[in-house]
Amino acid sequence: MRTAITAASLLLLAIACERRAEPAAARSPDGRWALRADRHDGTLVRLVISKAGGGGAPESLETRDTDVMKWVAGWSRQSDLLFYGSDTGTRIARRFDGTGWIDVPVTDDLCRQLEALFVAKYGRGGTHCTPDR
């Protein structure tokens, strides 16, 4: 009986500690940027953006979302950086304007693209993304 409880406890611990692995770096559609996600302070998701092929210091973006709940990061068709975190409903859309990354409004089209990224990662929808008005 004690062995069964210990085995069950180890299984629950393994499931609780599982982290969803992200690809090493996702290239933007225009090929200029690479995006990867890492964990900061254990569970907070941080996005790291760098020039594809190196050069220049990478920029990081703290999302304030955790890896405990579902989240997705990727690129729009226009090479806008996109992020959605389901625990806080955080929506991020940023575009490089030639000198730096600027926030852009989350449109209906960007919401649809976020939903497609979410479905590709988790196999079903769930962003509840609403456009900026």
Image (cartoon, rainbow, N blue to C red):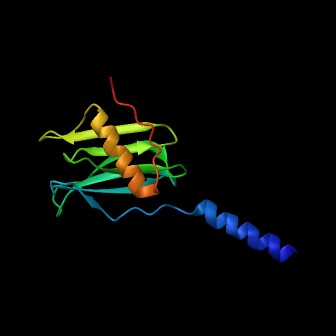
User: What residue is at 75 percent from the left and 73 percent from the top?
Assistant: 7
**Toward the viewer: 99 or 119?**
119
Residue, far left = 98
User: x, y (%) of residue 109?
Assistant: 28, 37
How far across and down, in percent of the image, does residue 40 sit?
45, 52
Q: Position of residue 106 (x, y in %)?
A: 31, 33
Q: Quadrant of the C terminus?
A: top left
Pick the residue in front: 108 or 14: 108
- Residue farthest front in this picture: 124
Residue found at the very far top of the displayed protein: 133
Please determine whether, in this image, residue 112 is positioned above or below residue 12.
above
Above or below, 38 against 62 in this view is below
**Residue drawn at x 45%, y 56% as measured from the top left:** 123
> Relative to residue 45, is residue 27 drawn left or right?
left
Residue 33 image position (x, y, % from top left): 20, 55
Quadrant (top left/top right/bottom left/bottom right) for the N terminus: bottom right
Q: Nearer the viewer, residue 11 or 108?
A: 108
Q: Is 53 placed left or right of 84 in the picture?
A: left
In which quarter of the view is residue 114 placed?
A: top left
Q: Residue furthest bottom?
A: 3
Q: In this figure, what is the number of numbered marks?
A: 0
The structure residue drawn at horizontal position 28% and vertical position 31%, both measured from the top left corner, is: 105
Residue at the spot x=47%, y=52% of the render? 124
Q: In this view of the protein, can residue 47 be seen by the observer?
A: yes
117 on left or right of 21: left
Q: Is residue 34 left or right of residue 14?
A: left
Q: From where the camera sits, is residue 46 visible?
A: no
